[in-house]
Image (cartoon, rainbow, N blue to C red):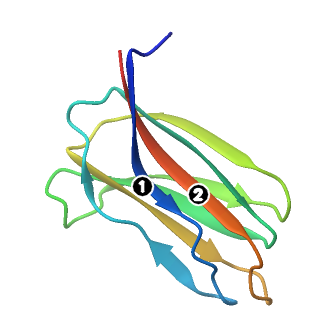
């Protein structure tokens, strides 16, 4: 399906030291059908695409495993009113690069 509208809801290039967590900004998503994005880093980690009905309690999430040097992509239904992305560096070393995007798509 082609989408007529795509908006970047969050972007980070903030480097994470070993075991650190990036928690993105909470964004309202009720005008989107899908949440998509990509993440790449040089250390292993995890990413959560979290959704909420109230912007406080994160009751639905999609988990991604991040492999060092390999990009990860996601495409999930927007089921909540709010969303954010959390990225955790699970490696024992600091990151030297990280790019993560959360995009809302409507069609």
For label 1, count other residues whose C-alpha is less than 10 Å away and answer few (under 14), some (14-19) or many (20+): some
- Residue under the image location 59 percent in, 40 percent down: 74
Q: Is residue 96 above or below residue 27?
A: below
Residue 17: image quadrant is bottom right
Q: Position of residue 56 (x, y in %)?
A: 19, 67
Locate residue 95 relative to residue 106 in the image: left or right: right
Please determine whether, in this image, residue 85 is positioned above or below residue 106.
below
Question: Do tag 2 and tag 1 residues touch (Cβ < 8 Å)?
Answer: yes
Horizontal and vertical percent for residue 101? 53, 51
Which residue is denoted by mark 1 in the rendering?
10
Provide the residue designation for mark 2. Answer: 100
Figure quadrant of residue 26: bottom left
How far from the left and from the top, in percent, is residue 62?
A: 50, 50
Residue placed farthest to the right in the image?
69
Farthest left residue?
54
Q: Which residue lies at the image location 70% right of the left edge and 89% below the top edge?
A: 18
Q: Is residue 86 left or right of residue 74?
A: left
Compared to residue 22, the image places residue 61 above or below, namely: above
Query: Which residue shows up at 81% across the image and 61% down it?
Result: 67
**Label 2 residue SS:** strand
Q: Residue 105: which numbered mark, if any?
A: none
Query: Closer to the N terminus: mark 2 or mark 1?
Result: 1
Query: Which percent across, then down, holds residue 94?
Result: 75, 87
From mark 2 to mark 1, how far is it between C-alphas?
8 Å
């Amino acid at each position: 399906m082609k989408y007529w509208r795509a908006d970047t809801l969050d972007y980070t290039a903030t480097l994470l030291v070993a075991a650190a967590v990036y928690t993105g900004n909470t964004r309202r998503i009720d005008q989107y059908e899908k949440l998509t994005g990509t993440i790449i880093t040089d250390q292993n980690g995890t990413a959560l695409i979290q959704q909420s009905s109230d912007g406080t309690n994160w009751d639905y999430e999609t988990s991604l495993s991040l492999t060092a040097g390999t990009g990860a992509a996601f495409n999930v239904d927007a089921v909540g009113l709010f969303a954010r992305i959390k990225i955790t560096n699970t490696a024992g070393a600091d990151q030297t690069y990280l790019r993560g995007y959360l995009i809302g798509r409507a069609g």
